[in-house]
Image: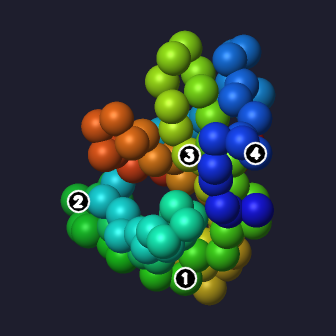
């Protein structure tokens, strides 16, 4: 469920469940509904050659609001299309500093 209210959010204060590989800062365009649901629509990132790539086919499998070491974040387990292949990634949004990151799932 992507709708987050303070009544139905389970905060996790323990260490992160799964390691993040190759965490990168990204620019992300998202939609926020009137009820507070955040939906990532597209993101841009710089590849190894320095080119800015745009990914606009994002399928959100699951999302959750997290709290690690007092830092709130929204995590989105997503599938994206990369060169015709489906790749599973983790998008994270940090509302305190309006920052998005992308990590590969192990």
Where is residue 100 shown, x and y percent of the image? Answer: 39, 49
Where is residue 73 shown, x and y percent of the image? Answer: 52, 38
The residue that mark 1 highlights is: 57
Where is residue 28 shown, x and y percent of the image? Answer: 36, 63
**Could you tell me if the residues under marks 2 and 4 are in contact, i.e. CB atoms within 8 Å?**
no
SS at mark 3 in the image: strand
Which circle, 2 or 4, is nearer the viewer?
Answer: 4
Give the Cα separation between the discs numbered 2 and 4. Answer: 41 Å
Give the numbered dot on residue 8. Answer: 4
Left of 103 or right of it: where is 55? left
Q: Residue furthest front?
A: 7
Give the Cα separation between the discs numbered 2 and 1. Answer: 21 Å
Which is more toward the observer, 106 or 65? 65
Which circle, 1 or 3, is nearer the viewer?
Answer: 3
- Upstream in the sequence, badge 2 or badge 1? 2
The residue that mark 3 highlights is: 74
- Upstream in the sequence, badge 2 or badge 4? 4
Find residue 51 and report its image quarter. Answer: bottom left
Left of 42 or right of it: where is 50? left
For residue 101, say whether it is visible: no
Give the Cα separation between the discs numbered 1 and 3. Answer: 19 Å
Which circle, 4 or 3, is nearer the viewer?
Answer: 4
Left of 79 or right of it: where is 52? left
SS at mark 1 in the image: loop
Q: Residues within 10 Å of mark 2 (few under 14, many from 20)?
A: few
Assign the N terminus to one quadrant of the image. Answer: bottom right
The residue that mark 2 highlights is: 50
């Amino acid at each position: 469920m992507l709708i987050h209210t303070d009544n139905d959010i389970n905060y996790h204060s323990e260490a992160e469940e799964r390691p993040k590989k190759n965490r990168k800062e990204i620019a992300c365009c998202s939609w926020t509904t009137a009820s507070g649901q955040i939906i990532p629509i597209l993101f841009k990132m710089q590849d190894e050659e320095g080119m800015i790539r745009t990914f606009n086919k994002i399928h959100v499998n699951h999302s959750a609001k997290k709290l690690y070491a007092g830092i709130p974040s929204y995590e989105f387990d997503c599938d994206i299309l990369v060169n015709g292949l489906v790749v599973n990634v983790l998008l994270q949004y940090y509302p305190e500093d309006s920052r998005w990151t992308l990590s590969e799932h192990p």
